[in-house]
């Protein structure tokens, strides 16, 4: 796990997950990369895979967990990418 975002304004993980499904594609687009985003409604998780990266966001009972794997070219930007993801998730949780 690379990032833990505690819930501030929601109490139901499903609500956060539903909101995140709407914003994650635009977060990925901000970085100018294309990705295949898969939603797992049963487990309240999202995964995105693209050229040189793989990300997963799991919505648990009290927090969202972000896992991020980056290829060699994107590793120097890991901090900035996680910061952007955190900002966007905090908008919905």
Image: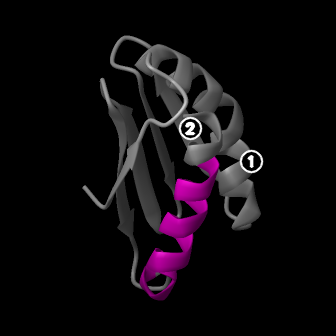
- Most prominent secondary structure in the magenta stretch? helix
Alpha carbon distance from label 2 to label 1: 11 Å
Determine whether 4 is above or below 6 in the image.
below
Residues marked 2 and 1 touching at CB (< 8 Å): no
Residue 17 locus on image (x, y percent): 51, 25
Determine whether 48 is above or below 1 in the image.
above
Q: Quadrant of the C terminus?
A: top right
- Classify residue 33 by image quadrant: bottom right
Please name the residue shown 32% across and 30% down the image. 62
Q: How is the image coloured?
A: one colour
Residue 31 locus on image (x, y percent): 69, 67
Residue nearest the viewer, comparing 66 with 32 = 66
Label whose residue precedes the other's in the sequence (2 or 1) = 1
Please name the residue shown 48% across and 85% down the image. 73
Q: Which residue in the structure is indicated by mark 2?
A: 37
As helix, strand or loop, the secondary structure at mark 2 comes to strand
Please name the residue shown 42% across and 56% down the image. 54
Front label number (2 vs 1)? 1
| Label 2: how many Cα within 10 Å (few below 14, some 14–19, many 20+) | some
Give the number of the disc on residue 36. none
Q: Which residue in the structure is indicated by mark 1?
A: 26
Determine whether 26 is above or below 19 in the image.
below
Q: Quadrant of the N terminus?
A: bottom left
Residue 2 locus on image (x, y percent): 30, 61
Q: Which residues are magenta?
A: 75-88
| Label 1: how many Cα within 10 Å (few below 14, some 14–19, many 20+) | few
Residue 50 locus on image (x, y percent): 53, 56
- Apparent side of residue 88 relative to residue 46 in the rendered image (left or right): right
């Amino acid at each position: 796990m690379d990032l833990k975002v505690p819930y501030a304004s929601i109490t139901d993980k499903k609500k956060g997950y539903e909101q995140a499904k709407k914003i994650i594609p635009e977060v990925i687009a901000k970085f100018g990369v294309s990705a295949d985003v898969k939603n797992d409604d049963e487990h309240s998780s999202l995964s995105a895979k693209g050229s040189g990266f793989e990300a997963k966001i799991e919505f648990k009972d009290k927090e969202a967990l972000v896992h991020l794997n980056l290829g060699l070219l994107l590793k120097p930007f890991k901090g900035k990418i996680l910061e952007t993801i955190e900002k966007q998730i905090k908008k919905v949780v």
